[in-house]
Image (cartoon, rainbow, N blue to C red):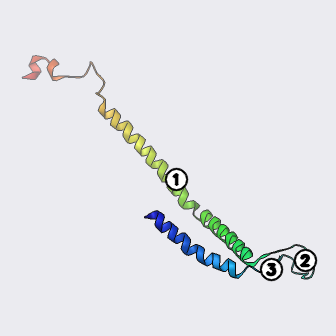
């Protein structure tokens, strides 16, 4: 089911992109020199759809990077919580193992079967 939904989403996204690319395939000049339009310092001719889709991709990358950097405090808090949980888990396991072991033998401990008869009655 997920695979069908994934393909459906890809097709729904791909159809407008392909139709946009077919409708805007004429060449445009992209220049980064605002002072000289006749002989720019650097210019490139490419289809309009390639230029616009390239800028959209750059915008997505910049926005994703900004979002990722903005969420660093949440990632740090999650990492610290994960480490704390691992420490508490280890301590609980250690205490559980210690509780499962019999107490060490103490030969000087007072045991009811070793009391003198005068104290047991």
x, y (%) of residue 84?
46, 48
10 Å neighbourhood of mark 1: few (<14), some, or many (≥20)? few
Between tags 1 and 3, which lies in front? 3
Left/right placement of residue 39 relative to residue 113 reads right
Check disc 3 and report the residue beneath it: 28
Real-space CA distance between mark 2 and mark 1, rounded to the nearest whole angstrom: 51 Å
Left/right placement of residue 38 relative to residue 61 reads right
Q: Which residue corresponds to the image point at 38% horizontal and 36% vertical from the top-left? A: 94
Q: Is residue 36 above or below residue 79?
A: below
Of residues 56 and 64, the one drawn nearer to the viewer in this rendering? 56
x, y (%) of residue 35?
90, 81
Q: Secondary structure at mark 2?
A: loop
Q: What numbered label is drawn on residue 40?
A: 2
Q: Is residue 64 above or below residue 32?
A: above
Residue located farthest toward the right when viewing the structure as drawn: 39
Number of numbered markers: 3
Between disc 1 and disc 3, whose residue precedes?
3
Q: Which residue corresponds to the image point at 69% horizontal and 74% vertical from the top-left? A: 53
Q: Secondary structure at mark 1?
A: helix
Q: Secondary structure at mark 3?
A: strand
Of residues 50 and 80, the one drawn nearer to the viewer in this rendering? 50
Between tags 3 and 2, which lies in front? 3
Between disc 2 and disc 1, whose residue precedes?
2
x, y (%) of residue 111?
19, 22
Q: Quarter of the image holding residue 62?
A: bottom right
10 Å neighbourhood of mark 3: few (<14), some, or many (≥20)? some
x, y (%) of residue 33?
87, 77
Check disc 1 and report the residue beneath it: 79
Left/right placement of residue 13 relative to residue 109 reads right
Real-space CA distance between mark 1 and mark 3, rounded to the nearest whole angstrom: 49 Å
Q: What numbered label is drawn on residue 69?
A: none
| Residues tagged 3 and 2 counted as in contact (Cβ below 8 A) | no
């Amino acid at each position: 089911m997920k695979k069908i939904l994934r393909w459906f989403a890809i097709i729904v996204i791909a159809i407008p992109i392909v139709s946009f690319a077919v409708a805007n395939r004429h060449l445009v000049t992209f220049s980064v020199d605002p002072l000289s339009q006749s002989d720019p310092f650097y210019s490139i001719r490419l289809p309009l759809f390639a230029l616009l889709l390239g800028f959209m991709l750059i915008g997505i990358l910049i926005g994703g990077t900004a979002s990722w950097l903005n969420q660093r405090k949440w990632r740090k808090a999650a990492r610290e919580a994960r480490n704390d949980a691992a420490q508490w888990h280890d301590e609980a396991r250690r205490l559980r193992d210690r509780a499962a072991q019999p107490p060490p033998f103490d030969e000087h401990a007072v045991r009811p079967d070793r009391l003198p008869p005068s104290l047991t009655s």
